[in-house]
Amino acid sequence: MEKVVIIGGGGGGAILANLLPEREFEIVVVDREEYHIFQPGYLWIAFKGWRKEIFMKPIRSLLKPHVKFVHGEATSVDLNERKVLMKDGKELSYDYIVIATGAHLNYDVIDGNRKILDEFGDFYSTVENAEKLWNAVWRTSKGNFVIGVADPIYKCPPGPHKAAFLSSELFSRRGLKDKVKVVLALPFPHSYPSKTIADIIEPELEKRGIEIRTFFTVDSIDTENKKIVSLEGEELEYSVATVIPPHEGPQYEIKPEVKDDNNFVKIDKYTSQIEGFDDAYAIGDCTNAPTSKSGVTAHLQAEVVAERLQGYDARYSGRTNCPLITDGKGIFIISDYDHPPVPVRLSAFKRLLEDLFLTTYWGAIRYPELWQPVFHAYFNATEPGKLVELGW
Amino acid sequence: MAEKNIGSVKLDRILTEDKIEALDKTLQLLSKLNELGILDTVTDILEPEVIERAASLIINPSTLRIVDRIDQLTGTLGKIDYDTLEKRINLLNEALKSIPEKPKRIGLLGLLGELRDPDVQRGMGVLIELLKAIGKAAEKQQK
């Protein structure tokens, strides 16, 4: 039996662990946290006031019984010696390693970013910060609620947009539609990196009075005067603000040097193999794969690695399926390495699919055999090459 | 021994009269399903490959597009005059069948020549009524 060590029990690691056959592999999942968080839930906590417990489950409960779980922090990975060094001094040797530790959000790059995180919370880091943001937003009765993005590389590309729609709906329901303005400040030329998608969502943003500031790259935050300043020289006043910080790859040491300038692990974008190694893989937000950082990416890469470890030539197509929801409707941003996003119609049905996904998420991780066929059928049916000009 | 007692105490608390009735009925249902062989069948069908095949039949671009517009679709289908459709479906079938793979080009002189054919004349009769109806409906729509 070969030993597979998976660092990270999140959206990529947990699924991968449950996909590997028990008879063939000894599987160990390492995570410094006890809980697996359904990260899109931060939005529901911050803007709908939902309880955080809905979006948290102990990693141990999500893993099949035969999978070992080590609650601890990896401090160093030696790809040549095939060893993982833990904080408590223990060493884990492996036959295969999969790095799935996600992205590190660096709040100390942009001046003032950590200050506003402490003051207002956010919807990108922890459930506690999401709860903090709910309180901050609830207390706001005038001025601007600014959602800013510091760097074009961040997980869940439609995240800020979902926050804009959901917060706008919240202010509306509080009768504050004309008193509080939601401002979306983005470092892109359009309201969304893809013009196809921007054309679909812009009318919706305008309809709801959400202000879009393009070409706005957050440079610093003046917390005394409550202003966000952009590299382009513009200023934005705020009553409440949240800025999605620059993302980086794993902060722990990986020997030899396989990370890029942003610390993301360099992989083959199709096979998820770490460059230069045939027994080391990386999946999810920690890699340099040239596609959106999202749960779908981690999931599909996990499937590819599971197949490859069993000897099949599986490849990741770069497929994305990011949901962008407004209050009653939704779209999916469907693209892959060979196709830019296809035109997708805002519909109530897609919004329903998003809710269904929320409710079935835990089951899908714990029982991948049941859900894989359904997901396969869906991803197959909605391949960008098949949807093409007609879209969905 | 002590553990068994704790278990049976818990069970006693849970199994109230109404729950016992519900449990009994559920077990009756399961017994019936078992007799009919349905339990065995369902167990057999629940294979990943079968689920995948069934899922891909149900989930494809066409069905997804239809389901996405289900409210529009039912609204539109609901407006169709089914009595008329039922009466005219044969005519529609014939009309669709008649469309040639490679249509001939017929100019004014050709048209005049074809108009000597009684079938074509009858067809013209239908077309004129169609044009009148479309014309009237188009005017209604403009208002």
Image (spheres, rainbow, N blue to C red):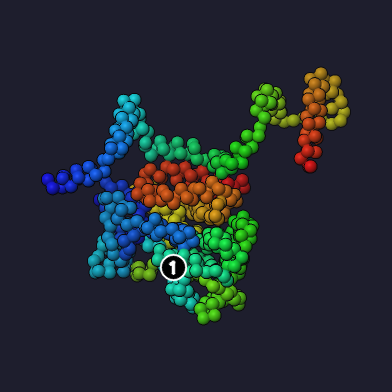
Image side of residue A322 versus residue A301, left or right: right
The one of A309 and A76 positioned closer to us in this rendering: A76
Residue A316 shows up from this direction: yes
The residue lying furthest to the front in this view is B17
Q: Position of residue B41 (x, y in %)?
A: 35, 30
Question: In the rendered image, which residue does mark 1 sit on?
Answer: A132
Residue drawn at the location 31% of the way across and 66% of the way down? A74
Residue A12 shows up from this direction: no
The one of A212 and A63 positioned closer to us in this rendering: A212
Image side of residue A270 versus residue B121, left or right: left
A391 in relation to A75, above or below? above
Residue drawn at the location 19% of the way across and 45% of the way down? B9
What is the quadrant of residue A91 in the picture?
Answer: bottom left
Judged from the image, the secondary structure of the residue bearing numbered disc 1 is: helix
Q: Position of residue A10 (x, y in %)?
A: 37, 58
B79 in relation to A175, above or below? above
The one of B31 and A391 positioned closer to us in this rendering: B31
